[in-house]
Image (cartoon, grey):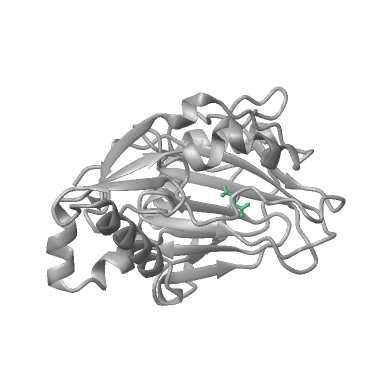
Amino acid sequence: MEIERLTGVLGARATGIDLGDLDDSSAAELRAATCAHEVLVVPGQELSPGDQTAFSHLLGPYSPVPFVQPVDGHPEVIRVVKEATEPEAFNFGGVWHSDFSFLSTPPAFTILHAIDVPDVGGDTVWASMTAAHDALDDGMRERLAGVKAIHSASASYSPAQQGLHAQLSGMDIRTSEDALEVHRHPLLCTHPETGRRSLYFNGTYVRGLEGPGIDSADDEQVMLRWLHEWTTHVRFTFRHRWSEGDVVIWDNRSTQHVALNDYRGQRREMTRTTVVGNRPAA
Ligand code: SIN
C-alpha cells in the first residue's frame, strides 16, 4: 500500500490495495492512515453493497443510521443520490456537518463509494478540526475548553423538513420527532486513537452551547457564528473531485464536510456505510 499526502493539512491517497480483498493487517494500516490523514481516497474500487459492508466491518461494527432508509437487502448501506431530473432539489449532505454528531455515540468513520458521478461538479470538501483546533490562540483554547456543544438533528430531520427530503426521489428519508432529541458533547475533544485534540463542532447539528463565557442567547449566537466561520475556513480544507470507483474514508471525529450542489441536470450516486465510534470525550 502506498500513501501519498494530498495537501499540507489533511487528505491522502492510498493506492496498491483492493478493498474487496483486504487482510486484517492491511485493514489496520488503512485505519491508522485514515486517523492520521483524516480523509483517505482509495481510487479504482469496484464494491457491491455486500462488498462495501464486508469492508466496513474490517474497520469496526456498523453504526446505526437514523432517518435514512437503507438499500434493499443491505441494511447497513444507504444510497446518496440526486437524479439529473431533480435540478432544483437540495442535495443530501449539502451543508457543513460531521455525520450524525447528534447521536450519543456518533460514527467514527464514513465510507463513501462513487457509483455515478457528474462530468463536472459534485465535489466533496472536508475541513480538519484538528487544524482548526491547533490554530486557536492559547486564550481562545482555554476559553473553549469548558464549553459543551448541544447537538441535535432538529434543523435537518424533524417533520418540518420532510418536504425538502421528498425532493430526492432516489432516497427514502423519514423525518420524525426523534430529531428533537439532544446530546451534549465537549467542544474540545481528544481523538481516542491519535491522542490529538480537535474542535468537535459543525454548524448543522450543533444547535446551542453551554459553559464559561456563554451567559446569554446573544453570546451563544455570536460564538456559534464564529465557530462556523473559523472551523470551515478554506485554509483547513481538502476538496475531492470524484471519479467513478473512488472510495473515500473519513474520520468524523476530527473533520466536518460538505457535498457541493453544483451539478444541475446531472446525476450523482454514491453508496455509504458508517462505522461505530465512541462517546466524544474531552
Ligand atoms: C454525506 O454527507 O454523507 C454525503 C457526502 C457526499 O455525498 O459527498
| Residue lying at 65% horizontally and 29% vertically, measured from the top left | 70
| Residue lying at 32% horizontally and 42% vertically, measured from the top left | 150
Examine the rendered structure and indicate whether residue 241 appears above or below residue 221.
Answer: below
Can you name the residue that lies furthest to the right here?
85
| Residue lying at 82% horizontally and 50% vertically, measured from the top left | 86
Q: Is residue 205 visible?
A: yes
Which of 64 and 185 lies nearest the eye of the viewer?
185
State the image quarter where residue 176 is shown: top right
With 128 as the anchor, is 214 left or right in this view? left
Number of marks in picture: 0
With 12 as the anchor, is 247 left or right in this view? right
Horizontal and vertical percent position of residue 241: 65, 67
Which of 143 and 107 lies nearest the eye of the viewer?
143
| Residue lying at 35% horizontally and 53% vertically, measured from the top left | 201
With 136 as the anchor, is 42 left or right in this view? right
State the image quarter where residue 108 is shown: top left
Examine the rendered structure and indicate whether residue 273 appears above or below residue 267.
Answer: above
Horizontal and vertical percent position of residue 21: 59, 42
